Amino acid sequence: MPPEYLGAHVAAPFSHQTGRFMPLSLRCATALFGHFGVEWVDTPDDTAWVHGVVAADGSAALMSYVQLEPPPHGRPVSLRLPGLDPGRRYLATNVTPGEPSARWSRGGEVLQAAEVTGAVLAGVGIDLPAVRPLTTVVVFAEAV
């Protein structure tokens, strides 16, 4: 079935049909991938869900990390972005919809973006700060 038929749309935070609550930022980040293609990315723990897309030429990637439940060790897993050119440099930017629930930091300095190689993004990934359940971090990496 094509993704556009799977109901990947943005609705109100409280579902009128089920009464469930999902934050608007989570709904937006999830719906984004329903119409642009999906590439599943495994995570080492089942409290998180990672999905995204990578440009066919390896020039860019858009990935979403969703914290479903509290992580077992109090820290989320690293967000890896496979499929990029290992020898190229990329600017990885936090583009989380709405008010970002998580901010990257290095040495106490809050970062909105970081420049790293495709090899680092695929192998080591981005070390995310702790996020609450039902929140997301969306990262866009573009070759520089």
Image (tube, rainbow, N blue to C red):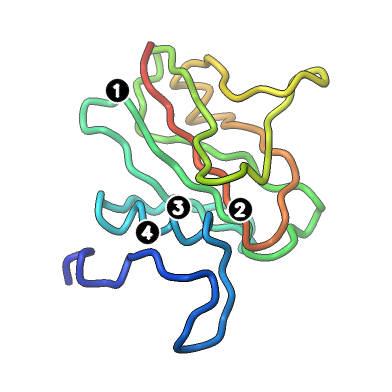
- Residue 103 locus on image (x, y percent): 68, 34
Q: Is residue 26 above or below residue 98?
A: below
Between label 1 and label 4, give the one nearer the viewer. 4
Between label 2 and label 1, give the one nearer the viewer. 1
- Residue 9 locus on image (x, y percent): 33, 65
Asked whether the beta carbons under mark 1 and mark 4 sit within 8 Å of each other, the answer is no
* Nearest to the observer: residue 57 or residue 67: 67
Task: Tell me which residue sits at (50%, 51%) in the image.
Answer: 50
How dense is the environment of label 1, judged by Cα within 10 Å: few (below 14), some, or many (20 and up)? some
C-alpha distance separating marks 1 and 4: 23 Å
Which residue is label 2 attached to?
44
Of mark 1 and mark 3, the one earlier in the sequence is: 3
- Residue 124 locus on image (x, y percent): 59, 29
Looking at the image, which residue sits at the far left? 2
Q: Is residue 129 above or below residue 143?
A: below
Can you tell which mark lies on residue 29? 3
Asked whether the beta carbons under mark 4 and mark 3 sit within 8 Å of each other, the answer is yes
Can you tell which mark lies on residue 74? none
* Nearest to the observer: residue 85 or residue 59: 59
Quadrant position of the N terminus in the picture:
bottom left
Task: Tell me which residue sits at (54%, 76%) in the image.
Answer: 14
Q: Is residue 115 above or below residue 10?
A: above
Which residue is label 4 attached to?
31
Task: Tell me which residue sits at (57%, 81%) in the image.
Answer: 20
Task: Tell me which residue sits at (27%, 72%) in the image.
Answer: 6
